[in-house]
Image (tube, helix red, strand yellow):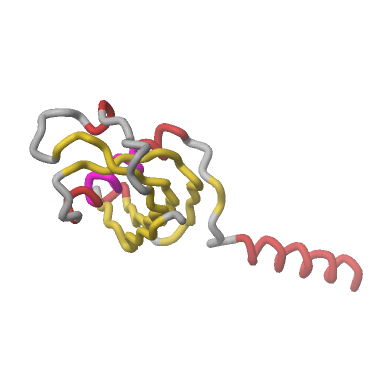
Amino acid sequence: MKAVCLVLIIAMSAVGSMVGNFTDMKDEKKIKELQDFCMTRLNQQTNSIYLKNVAKVVSAKQQVVSGMMYELVLEVGMTACRKSGSELLTDCEIDNNKPRELCTFKVWEKSWENFRSIEKMECKPIE
């Protein structure tokens, strides 16, 4: 009986430690949706006359909170598309002669409230 209780306690503690941890995202459509949301916000906040775009998704994770917390790490580069232009971001290619940045975004989403907010947006040059 003690052995059964011990096994149950160990199993419950292992499961309990996994709740709320970040896990890798597998939904490519959701990753693309979040990536577009993050790039729109980033481009709204930069002083450049040119748009930035995603060169590569480095990682995409999710965490169950009051809703979902998503963490995207994106390699971002400058494009030749002007912010004032009519091009869609999806049509803007990265200028490989410009330096790139590694950007981390945390996006909090509560779909039942139609709520989405960027909680963290941090970009650092890639050396």
Question: What residue sits 18% from the left and 42% below the top?
Answer: 50
How far across and how far down the image is residue 97, in percent?
Answer: 35, 40
Residue 125 placement, left or right of 64: left
Residue 97 placement, left or right of 80: right
Question: What residue sits 19% from the left and 54% below the top?
Answer: 46
Q: Quarter of the image holding residue 123?
A: bottom left
- Indicate yes or no whether the magenta region holds residue 40: yes
Above or below 27: residue 46: below
Q: Residue furthest bottom?
A: 2
Question: What residue sits 28% from the left and 29% below the top?
Answer: 90
Question: Which quadrant, please, contains the N terminus?
Answer: bottom right
The part of the chain drawn in magenta is: 33-41
Q: Residue furthest left?
A: 84
- Indicate yes or no whether the magenta region holds residue 54: no
Q: Quarter of the image holding residue 12?
A: bottom right
How far across and how far down the image is residue 79, in percent?
Answer: 26, 37
Residue 15 placement, left or right of 89: right
How far across and how far down the image is residue 114, in percent?
Answer: 24, 48
Residue 67 makes an appearance in the image: no
Front residue of 64/56: it is: 56
Residue 13 placement, left or right of 61: right
Question: What residue sits 48% from the left and 56% below the top?
Answer: 63
Q: Residue furthest front?
A: 97
Front residue of 13/49: it is: 49
Residue 73 makes an appearance in the image: yes
Q: Main secondary structure of the magenta part?
A: helix
How far across and how far down the image is residue 41, in percent?
Answer: 23, 50
Say how many tags the image has. 0
